[in-house]
Image: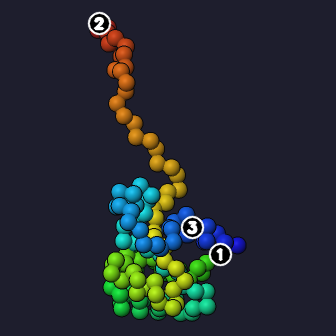
């Protein structure tokens, strides 16, 4: 059950790595965090922290999180020139773009009112 939940969470958190020509504006609109990816290893791989650290050292990655329970893998900032080498690593099942997710929807922006609100007339305070 935990594994199923993580698959759902990762599906919401990222899209499978593909090469595309989408602009940074489109990425931001889709909540994609530029340069951040989730690397998922094959289930048969063991010693995930060591493998993640080795890949970080060899490819100049900045590790963010290492996943060892529901999935095996890590999230990191990955230089664009290292993506293909990581994707082609036989230990890697897939790479997903990292996305920002929110527990609650962001409130809509409140713009200026259509017309000025009418304020009640000022009240006079009696003085003795």
| Percent x, y of residue 113 | 37, 27
Taking the spot 50% from the left edge, 67% from the top edge, the residue there is 14
Dot 1: element: helix
Separation of disc 2 and disc 1 at Cα?
A: 76 Å
- Left/right placement of residue 8 relative to residue 20 reads right
Among the two numbered marks 3 and 2 on one chain, the one whose residue lies closer to the N terminus = 3
Among the two numbered marks 2 and 1 on one chain, the one whose residue lies closer to the N terminus = 1
- Left/right placement of residue 24 relative to residue 68 reads left
Task: Provide the residue designation for mark 2.
Answer: 128
Location of residue 100 with respect to 42 vertically, above or below: above
Task: Provide the residue designation for mark 1.
Answer: 3
| Percent x, y of residue 59 | 35, 87
Taking the spot 51% from the left edge, 91% from the top edge, the residue there is 90
Separation of disc 3 and disc 1 at Cα?
A: 12 Å
Location of residue 70 with respect to 115 vertically, above or below: below
Looking at the rendered image, the disc whose residue lies closer to the viewer, 2 or 1, is 1
Residue 111, quarter of picture: top left
| Percent x, y of residue 76 | 41, 77
Residue 4, quarter of picture: bottom right
Looking at the rendered image, the disc whose residue lies closer to the viewer, 3 or 2, is 3
Task: Provide the residue designation for mark 3.
Answer: 11
Separation of disc 3 and disc 2 at Cα?
A: 71 Å
Taking the spot 35% from the left edge, 61% from the top edge, the residue there is 23
Q: Nearer the viewer, residue 59 or 22?
A: 22
Q: Nearer the viewer, residue 126 or 58?
A: 58
Dot 3: element: helix
Q: Nearer the viewer, residue 68 or 7?
A: 7
Among the two numbered marks 3 and 1 on one chain, the one whose residue lies closer to the N terminus = 1
Location of residue 104 with respect to 63 vertically, above or below: above
User: Is residue 92 in view from this perspective?
Assistant: yes
- Residue extending farthest front: 21
Taking the spot 49% from the left edge, 77% from the top edge, the residue there is 95
């Amino acid at each position: 059950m935990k594994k199923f939940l993580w698959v759902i969470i990762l599906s919401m958190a990222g899209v499978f790595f593909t090469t595309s020509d989408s602009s940074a504006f489109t990425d931001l609109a889709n909540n994609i965090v530029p340069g951040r990816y989730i690397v998922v290893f094959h289930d048969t791989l063991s010693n995930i922290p060591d493998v993640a650290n080795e890949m970080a050292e060899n490819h100049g990655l900045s590790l963010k999180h290492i996943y060892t329970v529901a999935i095996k893998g890590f999230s990191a900032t990955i230089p664009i020139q290292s993506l293909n080498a990581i994707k082609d690593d036989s230990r890697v099942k897939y790479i997903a773009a990292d996305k920002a997710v929110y527990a609650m929807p962001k409130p809509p922006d409140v713009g200026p009112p259509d017309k000025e609100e009418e304020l009640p007339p000022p009240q006079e305070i009696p003085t003795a």
